[in-house]
Image (cartoon, rainbow, N blue to C red):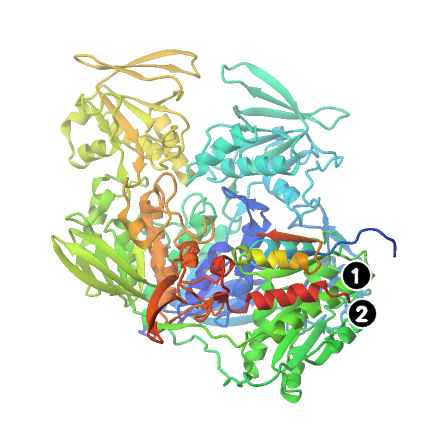
Amino acid sequence: MNNKLSINTAKQGSVLIVGGGIGGMQAALDLANSGFNVQMVHKDSGIGGTMAMLDKTFPTGDCSMCMISPKMVELSRHINIDMHTLANVVSVEGEPGDFKVKVKLMPRYVDSEKCTGCGICEEKCPKKLTSEYEQGLTVRKAIYSLFPQALPNTRVIDRDNCIYFQKGKCKVCEKFCTANAILWEDTEKEIELNVGAIILSPGLERYNPVIRPELGFGRWPNVVTSIQFERILSASGPYQGTVMRPGDKKHPKKVAWIQCVGSRDFNNANPWCSSVCCMYATKQAMIAKDHDPDIEPAIFYIDMRTFGKDFDKYVTRAQEDYGVRYQRALISMVREEPDTGNLILRYAEQDGKLSTETFDMVVLSIGFQPHSDAASFSKIFGIELDKDLFAKTGSFTPVETSQPGIYVTGIYQGPKDIPETVMQGSAVAGKAMELLNEARGTKARIKEIVPERDVKNEDPRIGVFVCHCGFNIAGTIDIQAAVEHAKSLPNVTYAGDYLFACSKDSQDKMKEMIETDKLNRIVVAACSPRTHDVLFQETLQDTGINKYLFEMANIRNQCSWVHSADKQGATKKAKSLIQMAVSKACLLEPLYEQEVAMNRSALVIGGGLAGMTAAKNLADQGYHTYLIEKSNALGGQALNLYKTWQGDDVPEYVAESIHGIKSNPNIDVLLNTRLKKADGFVGNFQSIVETKGKEQQIDHGVTIIATGATEFKPDQYLYGKDPRVLTALELDRKLIDKNDSLKDMNTTVFIQCVGSRNKENPYCSKVCCTHAVQNAIELKTLNSAMFVFILYRDIRTFGRREELYREAREKGVIFIRYDIDTEININPGKTDLEINFISPDLQQGVKINANMLVLSTAMRAPQENPIAQLFKLPTNEDGFFIEAHVKLRPMDFAADGVFVCGLAHSPKPIDESIAQGLGAASRAVTLLSRKKAFGSAIVSKPIDENCDGCAFCIDTCPFKALTLLEYMKNGDVKKTVETNEVLCKGCGSCMATCPKLGIFVSGFTINQLNAQVEAALEIV
Amino acid sequence: MNDKFNPLIIAFCCNWCAYAAADLAGVSRLQYPVNTRIIRVMCTGMIHPNMVIDSLTKGADGVLICG
């Protein structure tokens, strides 16, 4: 990048995002929902990245595609996101706030304006090629989309493999394309974008295990990579979710996972730990067993690194409920058994004895690495990389590159899982908004609103639009019969068929029909409302029809596609589905979303690093922020820490941050302050706080919870009884104070997992292994002659921290494993502490005489959590807050307007707390940046004359959206309920509970649902 | 037509999970009999017990609640 001299130009209200994986998507949506224009550049033909390839996700087993697909749809439809696929950035000029970016667009050879995404071209294309998305396990065509749900859903022609391009004739795709969308003459183009900030989220590459021939990948067909196995498990994958081995399509019984392939290997591969493989192998083993109970999974590992929130419990479930076998062993070789295709693994057992064992299938848990073009990619943006080609970031600036105005998220910054990528995705959005705050709204587009036609007094005049979806529907269902049936139904004024109901010309026709036939209810019989209702609803709005006067009959996904062998039955069912939709449509009424004014200030609870980071980011984006802290000082747990794992000084940074907070005019800091009462909802919270006996009310629009965690003080290993026994933070204190006694120690012993990963507290505290390794190195640096022992269960120096582990071993720190079931005995001798335990690796007792014993104690959530009670927020059994969704909403709660960050969410190191603090602020700004908060229109509505105030509904409402009211009616007290439409999520638990038909959910009333039932039972 | 029992099943499906799963079954081209009629609800929590009874008394052969 060429840096021009600063010329004080106005900042741009738009942001470039390079890479459309989940991290880039999160950043894009946060920015676009906060008044910025987003230019997304993605090198593949469709967005989604790695997450779109996964079958299920740990630790909940949720379907990956089901989670990412709605996000992709939201992104592709967003008025303020412009997507450029098959695109690469070629040059960047300018300065933070005003960059000029040249982007090269590769030809797609399909006109996305005309293409309806029907896919007939792909079906008819005669050329078959290996599918990259399916990891070579099946074929794709020369005109294709990456996967069925890919967005944009315009296919792309693979020029190098297209028969027409290579041999000059074929054009089968063109022949079948009814939309005339094939564009043979398409060419490469270059566009220039003017943006204020740049976000890099290029994603990852996987280690190629061919480099390790002893493991047999590429040689033995039944050795697969973990990403191949992911596709094998997928219901939409090459084997439709049946677990088969590629060599002979037999069902494997014994399946082995080999961990750390390409990771933690300083000689042949990548030195870092890829952070996710232990968990995904566990997940794959469990899902495989779900698919086929006869499978016997075995995972061969070095250290079980399941350090995240609820991860250890997942492994326990895998072991206890699924019978997954975990074997600590290094596999030295995989050979194929002649004739059977089975695989013989050779490994060293715990006692060092060499063993062999035969498996039917082997999965290599391959790790992550930056893209092979990471170096040239970085040069375009002028950012520095570290020695391993990850983008260089700081301990306290985890998402900032070396180039101001350019930010990084995801694996380009270091190995990490989905929630951390999402946290960083929001964090980069927060940083970009901080930079560009003054330009917010300057490039955002606003949709024009057409005045609504009042249809209340009109009889229903229903228009039914039946879609062919190319051959997708018409190939199975008799469309004409369906249209004729629709015409025969009461209140149907118009029925017609459309090749693609969603295409632009059909939408224009729909508008025309609404106007000429005075239609006031619309039924579209096509695909799913989950993907397409917004599109059609927009058309209704454009013609002044309330968008809730709309219903879809799902005759594709839930009819033609699933009944393609029964054309007659499918046609009958389609007619029935249309009749059901029409019956409901007759009863539809216009609905309106509740609007409430947004109080544009924030309350941050907890003045630790996460809370301070969130408060500062909000304040720097111009939002007034109240930061309350129950103790008498800001800083939280960071006040007790010496250095980050990268070696940066924590006390110095904390002091700087506190100064920044105190001098920020947009932040009110309230120390010695506790929350006493929390009322209200998104946009309008009223909180009562108490400072040294004095109460005051704070009005705020959003709440960020950063209440932290504390170090566990144990009642074992002589802690508190012998001054030679310390906790990890007490050692940090001595290091901060430069305590002279430290270097005089002969021998120091660290014990890991004190209060973590046991029966009572079955979770990992995530930071203690790295902390111990780091302090062991520190002690060795103070006195290289000191003996330092670390007694551990699994060393969990995840990600890039693995290099610290290596450094410690090189410096002579001795690591000895202990078993949780055998006790460690400490005898307080006069001169030394005598430490006795049994090592399962050495298979004998070990005695160490130490001068200092450091206990790596757990991180504990508060035993009593008034904040959780006041805001009615859920916590897990370990006391940490439960976020709205473990993967894609790691800062949100199910309740709108309340967010979480830092240790209150789960144990995590400083860099992650800072990223999550920024992320929580970014999520909050998606609300604060609006003048009004909108509720949903699909909410419960009490019917006063039916309601007798029994209040059954109030007890069942999971969102506390209902209140009981009393008022005077005809001289008597009448009880009734009232819905808070902002809190209500439209679940209808009230409706199902009410014995008096006294409350309904708009758009899903009992009458409307019953009309559907009755129509379904009619004979068609 | 044969005399085989040809039931009609009303399936109330939650918009956020089971309805999405039924869509995915389509995307995956999984085949199943034509006897179900899916009714989309925002949460299975909204299904009043009377709706189940009414469906059966009006002639449904089965009611499936998926969520």
The residue labelled by disc 2 is A175
Of A815 and A289, which appears nearest the observer? Answer: A289
For residue A124, the mark is 1
Q: Who's the residue at 24% across and 56% down the image? A: A677
Q: Who's the residue at 45% across and 37% down the image? A: A311
Mark 1 and mark 2, same subunit? yes
> Closer to the N terminus: mark 1 or mark 2?
1
For residue A503, the mark is none
Q: Residue furthest front?
A: A971
Query: Are the residues flagged by discs 1 and 2 in contact, CB closer than 8 Å?
Result: yes
Q: Residue furthest top?
A: A844
x, y percent for residue A57: 53, 45
| Quadrant of the rendered image containing residue B61 | bottom right
Q: Secondary structure at mark 2?
A: helix
x, y percent for residue A1006: 56, 65
Q: Secondary structure at mark 1?
A: helix
| Mark 1 residue type | Lys
